[in-house]
Amino acid sequence: MEINPVYTFEPAKISQNQDALQALIAKAKEGSQPAFAEIYNLYFKKIYKFIYFRVGHKEAAEDLAEDVFVKAFEKIKTINNNNSFDAWLYQIARNKIIDYYREKKSTIALEEVENTLEYETNVIDAVDLKDRQKALLKMMKELGTEQQAVLKLKFLEDFSNKEIAELLNKNEGAIRVIQHRAITKLQELINKPDLK
């Protein structure tokens, strides 16, 4: 999908200005490709990161992110409430990830395994991780699934508590509680004598 933005909105301003975003969504629903291109520019990085952290492979994440936007473009007219656009888009991404793992479960080619093992950014990423980062990632695994999801969305993917609440079908208060408990648990794990 080639993107040629026509609108002059800056992504940061649109994401902070709900009216501008709602106007873009409304135009995209009417079939405006330039409006959808702006939406693509606003959301692609976030969707890509959301997928990448779940599939762990750059090319697969790129392909799936593109698939998300193709599907969104085809189905954008079906959105009843423009305010739920983010949650709707991330639901498409979740479904693509589920489909990806379903397909992968039944057929894993030997070449793909070799490519994953030899893929240079995987090696670079592994080398670049410092000991403390590795320890933090290990500690994250000791948190509950929900706590991990909230921390990843908040600190790795830069989501607001409101966005996280919509994605996880919870209220903002519950998200703050989950986040607080997760951080408290991480602090306890960090302060263990064997990690110093």
Image: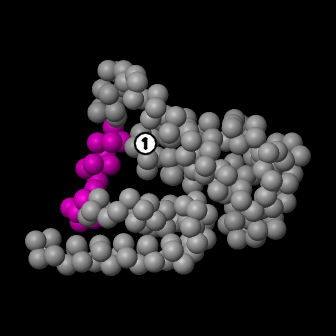
10 Å crowding of disc 1: few (<14), some (14-19), many (20+):
some
Q: In the image, is residue 77 above or below residue 156?
A: above
Q: Position of residue 107 (x, y in %)?
A: 40, 22
Q: Is residue 7 visible?
A: no
**Does the magenta portion include 186?**
no
Residue 109: name its quadrant.
top left
Q: In the image, is residue 106 above or below residue 175?
A: above
Assign the N terminus to one quadrant of the image.
top right
Q: Position of residue 79 (x, y in %)?
A: 78, 50
**Front-lying residue, 109 or 172:** 172
The local secondary structure at tag 1 comes to helix
Q: Position of residue 158 (x, y in %)?
A: 52, 65
Q: Say left or right for 168 vs 33.
A: left
Question: How are the colours assigned in the image?
Answer: one colour
**Front-lying residue, 77 or 132:** 77
Which secondary structure type mostly characterizes the magenta part of the structure? helix
Q: Say left or right for 113 vs 189.
A: right
Q: Is residue 54 visible?
A: yes
What residue would you read off at disc 1? 55
Q: Kindly identify the residue that appears in the image at 54 percent across and 78 percent down.
A: 173
Q: Kindly identify the residue that appears in the image at 51 percent across and 52 percent down.
A: 50
The amino acid type of the residue labelled 1 equals Val
Q: Say left or right for 40 vs 111.
A: right
Residue range in magenta is: 120-138
**Does the magenta portion include 131?**
yes
Q: Kindly identify the residue that appears in the image at 85 percent across and 54 percent down.
A: 26
Q: Position of residue 128 (x, y in %)?
A: 29, 54
